[in-house]
């Protein structure tokens, strides 16, 4: 790898919530070069980003949109590619040192693996990839000597709290949760919630899929599995703590009982910037915590009887192998259907439950088996909810 002062990155999913905030961090700091950008289909925003950041490669999932974009940026020195091939090219770009995985869903698996194989460090937001393929990704990263730098706020908090510590002296990870927009509700209340209600997160503005995952607590379940892989801590030593205002982003308890926490206002630019400049910190404009007006921080236990996303995720993780893939794939499809008004909120739980119940676990699945399990789960989801 080249040892320049300036860093060069590529972004998988640059038009989304994490992608655009990554570019804000780049714009603010002025010393990161953007070699590659990519989007699913939003070429209007992607074109603007290309004109501002001058990447040499742009990947668009949708082939038609890729063609249109290529026509629009003919005056620039940028190559436009499409489909999975395009994402793989972006992931492995010669010039880039870090791949920011800001894409949503387990579609990120193959590009993430390709980037690790090519020796790129990963600034990881795309948790679905680690949840389903963590057993392949973590050993591969170790073998290739690449860093997996967490962008998810909880995992960044833990990463910051263990900086300079001996990992073997971690006793327990305490992952904080806001509880989502439906905190305090019971199952009978959830039967009637609407898409608009589920999209109102109390503290964070995020992409639609993760916002729904926060309402079901599936997001917290995915984060428990993500933490297990990132920090090599088993499930019995990971505890979810509800802290409704999202001031504490997560905590670590060490063997001597000391608890280290990272606090701050809810702003994803902090974990994004920390991942890009690790182990250094940079000035970050924005609101700060004010301990003159902050009067209390409260804690609760998560309601596992109502918000089944969390206990089902723990179950999927304990059963291991291909089960987290089934959990994740059923959830991805169910959330898309819920967002389209095709199923109710609790049908997301029903989908995951039934998909898991009918699945025969494959131990240590290889990449092909993970992708096959994903495809089969999607297929089953279509027949399950067909009218
Ligand atoms: P988002 O929906 O806002 O953005 C997703 C991005 O992925 C977009 O740029 C979209 O164009 C791109 N994309 C989607 N499908 C694609 C495809 N097939 N090919 C190429 N690009 C594709 O999502 P987000 O909220 O930014 O979340 C991204 C990831 O980060 C998710 O895994 C999420 O769980 C995680 N995350 C997000 C936040 C947050 O604050 N938004 C916080 C923590 C973790
Ligand atoms: Mg998070």
Image (cartoon, grey):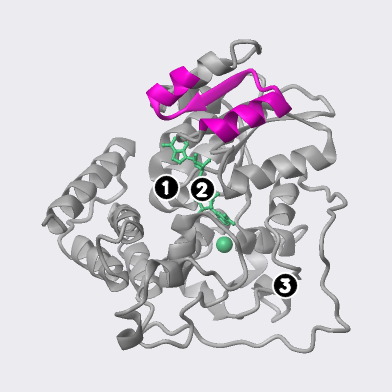
Q: Is residue 270 above or below residue 145?
A: below
Q: Are marks 3 and 1 in contact (CB under 8 Å)?
A: no
Q: Secondary structure at mark 1?
A: loop
Q: Is mark 2 within 8 Å of ligand 1?
A: yes
Which dot marks residue 126? 2
Q: CA distance from mark 2 to mark 3?
A: 23 Å
Q: Is residue 18 above or below residue 6?
A: below
Q: Does residue 341 appear to the left or right of 268 in the view shown?
A: left
Q: Is residue 50 magenta?
A: yes
How many other residues sit within 10 Å of disc 3, few (<14), some (14-19) or many (≥20)?
A: some
Q: Which residues are magenta?
A: 43-68
Residue name at image x 51 percent, y 74 percent:
180
Which dot marks residue 105? 1
Task: In this rendered view, identify the residue nearer to me: 50 or 68.
Answer: 68
Q: Does residue 374 appear to the left or right of 317 in the view shown?
A: left
Which sits earlier in the primary sequence, circle 2 or circle 3?
Answer: 2
Which sits earlier in the primary sequence, circle 3 or circle 1?
Answer: 1
Specify the quadrant of the image occupied by residue 356: bottom left
Q: Is mark 1 within 8 Å of ligand 1?
A: yes
Q: Is mark 3 within 8 Å of ligand 2?
A: no
Q: Position of residue 179 (x, y in %)?
A: 52, 77
Q: Is residue 191 magenta?
A: no
Q: Position of residue 200 (x, y in %)?
A: 52, 69
Q: Are marks 1 and 2 in contact (CB under 8 Å)?
A: yes
Q: CA distance from mark 1 to mark 2?
A: 7 Å
Q: CA distance from mark 3 to mark 1?
A: 29 Å
């Amino acid at each position: 790898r080249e040892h320049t002062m300036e860093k060069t990155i590529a972004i998988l999913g640059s038009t989304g919530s994490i992608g655009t905030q990554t570019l804000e961090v780049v714009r603010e700091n002025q010393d990161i070069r953007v070699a590659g950008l990519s989007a699913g289909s939003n070429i209007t925003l992607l074109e603007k980003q290309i004109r501002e950041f001058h990447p040499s490669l742009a990947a668009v999932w949708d082939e038609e949109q890729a063609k249109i974009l290529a026509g629009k940026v003919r005056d620039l020195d940028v190559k436009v590619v499409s489909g999975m091939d395009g994402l793989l090219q972006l992931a492995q770009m010669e010039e880039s040192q870090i791949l920011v995985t800001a894409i949503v869903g387990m579609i990120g698996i193959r590009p993430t693996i390709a980037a690790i194989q090519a020796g790129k460090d990963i600034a990881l937001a795309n948790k679905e990839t680690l949840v389903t393929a963590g057993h392949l990704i973590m050993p591969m990263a170790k073998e290739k000597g690449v860093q997996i730098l967490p962008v998810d706020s909880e995992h960044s908090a833990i990463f910051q709290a263990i900086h300079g510590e001996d990992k073997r002296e971690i006793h327990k990870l305490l992952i904080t949760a806001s509880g989502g927009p439906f905190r305090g509700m019971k199952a009978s209340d959830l039967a009637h919630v609407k898409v608009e209600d589920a999209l109102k997160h109390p503290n964070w503005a995020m992409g639609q899929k993760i916002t729904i995952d926060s309402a079901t607590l599936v997001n917290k379940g995915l984060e428990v599995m993500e933490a297990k892989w990132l920090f090599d801590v088993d499930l019995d030593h990971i505890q979810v703590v509800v802290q409704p205002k999202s001031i504490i982003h997560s905590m670590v308890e060490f063997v001597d009982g000391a608890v280290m926490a990272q606090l701050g206002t809810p702003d994803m630019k902090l974990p994004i910037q920390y991942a890009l400049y690790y182990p250094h910190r940079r000035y970050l404009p924005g609101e700060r915590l004010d301990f003159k007006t902050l009067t209390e921080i409260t804690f609760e236990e998560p309601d596992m009887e109502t918000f089944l996303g969390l206990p089902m995720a723990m179950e999927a993780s304990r059963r291991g192998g291909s089960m987290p893939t089934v959990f994740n794939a059923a959830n991805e499809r169910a959330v898309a259907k819920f967002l389209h008004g095709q199923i109710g909120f609790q049908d997301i739980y029903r989908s995951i439950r039934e998909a898991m119940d009918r699945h025969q676990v494959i131990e240590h699945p290889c990449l092909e088996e993970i992708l096959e399990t994903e495809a089969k789960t999607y297929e089953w989801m279509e027949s399950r909810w067909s009218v």
